[in-house]
Image (cartoon, coloured by chain):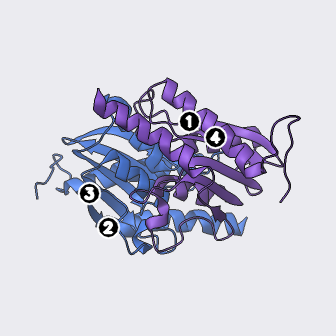
Chain colours: A purple, B blue
Amino acid sequence: MRYISFGDEPTISPDDFFMNEALKEAKEALAEDEIPIGAVVVWNGRIIGRGHNLTERLNDVSAHAEMQALTAAANSMGGKYLRDCTLYVTMEPCVMCAGACYWFQLSRIVFGAYDVKLGFGRLNQKVTHPKTIITGGIRENECAELVKDFFRTKRGK
Amino acid sequence: MRYISFGDEPTISPDDFFMNEALKEAKEALAEDEIPIGAVVVWNGRIIGRGHNLTERLNDVSAHAEMQALTAAANSMGGKYLRDCTLYVTMEPCVMCAGACYWFQLSRIVFGAYDVKLGFGRLNQKVTHPKTIITGGIRENECAELVKDFFRTKRGK
């Protein structure tokens, strides 16, 4: 695996780097009092789509981070499919988002925290595209803590 | 089951009536050279959201009829959930759309043609909301023929 170096900063893997970008999106959601989940779509080492959860602002329960990032990426590519692209998302995608990834024919999905209850991994059949490679658990704790803290604060209110 | 009467027209069931409305949407898609799939969302006997497949026009593989109709209905309701609503769609929803139906907490999904390959019914786990009732096969032949004809014509070109 290739690594990216940023001068004095410690060298990090591309997956860590791009998950950090997804985490930045999640923090934007948090600042807007949305469930803090963020996503970026990467093509050829470049971010071509970003998104975070907007279910409250758009009053739309389907406005998940992944849906925002995927449609932004498809717009930026000017094409329908995202065949050579990787989706980085801080939380394991739900069934809807995994189903969307099928249609976009992503080459890879990388997620942070596992979602045992609502994540697509609970299904015992593959719902993403047959060619899509899945990696879970990248910066898992940071991704999970962000959401746990959000709900802890909400309950504490 | 209650029936709707329209003067001289033969009496039809509400499911037939609203599937006919979904079929009208599918025909709008056809007129725009889109895969002819249409959907309506019904609340309290009233259509509160309509949509048809727009994947070509929007250059977005996730712009399915259901997604259009669901977000239109949620907008019209001014609320996040569609708890007392029924989605009528001419084709069995895919995994993405069934996953979206989970989030919208629809009370019922009625579809026309079965989609053995890509429909959510192929999954052996329930992905829609536990409270959502599913009915398939309403005006099945008309719904199926519309799509079959579309692809026959495409292949013949």
Query: Where residue B132 sits in the image (x, y, percent)?
Result: 26, 57
| Nearer-the-camera pick, A29 or B72 | A29
Q: Amino acid at mark 2?
A: Gly
Mark 1 neighbour density, 10 Å: few (under 14) some (14–19) many (20 or more): many
Residue occupied by mark 4: A22
Q: Secondary structure at mark 2?
A: strand
CB atoms at circles 2 and 3 under 8 Å apart? Answer: no
- Chain for disc number 1: A
Question: Closer to the camera: disc 1 or disc 2?
Answer: 1
Query: Which residue shows up at 62% across the image and 49% down it?
Result: A139
Mark 3 neighbour density, 10 Å: few (under 14) some (14–19) many (20 or more): many
CB atoms at circles 1 and 4 under 8 Å apart? Answer: yes
- Chain for disc number 4: A
Q: Amino acid at mark 3?
A: Thr
In space, the residues marked 2 and 3 are separated at their CA atoms by 13 Å
Residue B132's tag is 3
- Chain for disc number 2: B
Query: Which residue shows up at 54% across the image and 71% down it?
Result: A126
In space, the residues marked 1 and 4 are separated at their CA atoms by 6 Å
Q: Amino acid at mark 4?
A: Ala
Residue occupied by mark 1: A26
Residue occupied by mark 2: B136
- Chain for disc number 3: B
Query: Where residue B83 sits in the image (x, y, percent)?
Result: 24, 44
CB atoms at circles 3 and 4 under 8 Å apart? Answer: no
CB atoms at circles 3 and 1 under 8 Å apart? Answer: no
Q: Is there one chain holding both mark 1 and mark 4?
A: yes
Query: Where residue B136 sits in the image (x, y, percent)?
Result: 32, 67
Q: Amino acid at mark 1?
A: Ala
Question: Closer to the camera: disc 2 or disc 3?
Answer: 3
Q: Is there one chain holding both mark 1 and mark 2?
A: no
